[in-house]
Amino acid sequence: MNLGQVKTRALALMDEYSVDGTLNSETENADYLNRMAVFASDAQFEIADKVNIDASIVYQLEKQDDSVKYHKLDLPTNYKELKFIYFNDELFEGAYRLVNRQLWISSGYVGVLELFYNKNPQTLDAETEDSYEFEVEEHVQHLIPYYVGGQAFSGEKDEISDKLLNLYYGKLDAVRKEYNDGQQTIDTTFFM
């Protein structure tokens, strides 16, 4: 789902999409539309706290001078929390430190290190293009218009705002991370 689709769905939920079958113009809804990217950003961050956004980055560790004690690798700007590390295609079980947004690993390691982490989504603002694709998983993107519509009406039409936000938070509470590890069935044999 992209930002433009979220805006359209939020307007529909707010009952601001059309009047008697005629679509409302963008100028008629300009105040709502100008604020919606910021609200969508807030929703995406909130959802990402519940359903993490997976990411990885690869580092090439080169041989260091004997005077260098650590490889000091800058973490990505969107880094949120570490999941695990692979070194030369095997799970890394060695010692490391996270210091000032850097990953420190002994300079004795030479090879390919892949860092798997949870990331923060991009922060959206009024300048964000409507073609922006949301980073949270597809199965939770449908929640964003409820939050956006609820926030857009906050202080204006509080009854509709409260209803949309209650729907959003109720649906968010029911969200679980989907895992697709290829397993299709669970086979269990019971013995008595």
Image: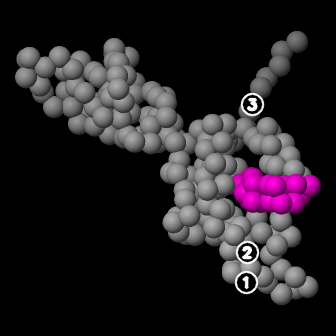
Question: Relative to 57, is 158 above or below?
Answer: below
Instruction: Give percent across and percent down for residue 95.
Output: 34, 14
Residue tagged 2:
29
* Residue depicted at 83% across the width and 60% down the height: 156
Residue 187 got which mark?
3
Q: Is residue 147 magenta?
A: yes
Q: Nearer the viewer, residue 19 or 184?
A: 19
Q: Which of marks 1 and 3 is in front?
A: 1
Q: Which of 119 and 162 is in front in this view?
A: 162
Q: Characterize the local packing of mark 1: few (<14), some (14-19) or many (20 or more) Cα atoms within 10 angstroms.
A: few
The amino acid type, in three-letter code, at marker 1 is Ser
Query: Is there a contact, CB below 8 Å, between mark 2 and mark 3?
Result: no
Query: Is there a contact, CB below 8 Å, between mark 1 and mark 2?
Result: yes
The amino acid type, in three-letter code, at marker 2 is Asn
Residue tagged 1:
25
Side of 179 relative to 127 (left or right) = right
Highlighted range, magenta: 143-161
Q: Which comes before the other along the chain, label 1 or label 3?
A: 1
Residue 105 got which mark?
none
* Residue depicted at 61% across the width and 60% down the height: 37
> Residue extending furthest bottom?
22
Q: Does the magenta stretch include residue 136?
A: no
Side of 31 relative to 98 (left or right) = right
> Residue extending furthest front?
155
Q: Characterize the local packing of mark 3: few (<14), some (14-19) or many (20 or more) Cα atoms within 10 angstroms.
A: few
Q: Which of 152 and 94 is in front in this view?
A: 152
Q: Quadrant of the N terminus?
A: bottom right
Q: Main secondary structure of the magenta part?
A: helix
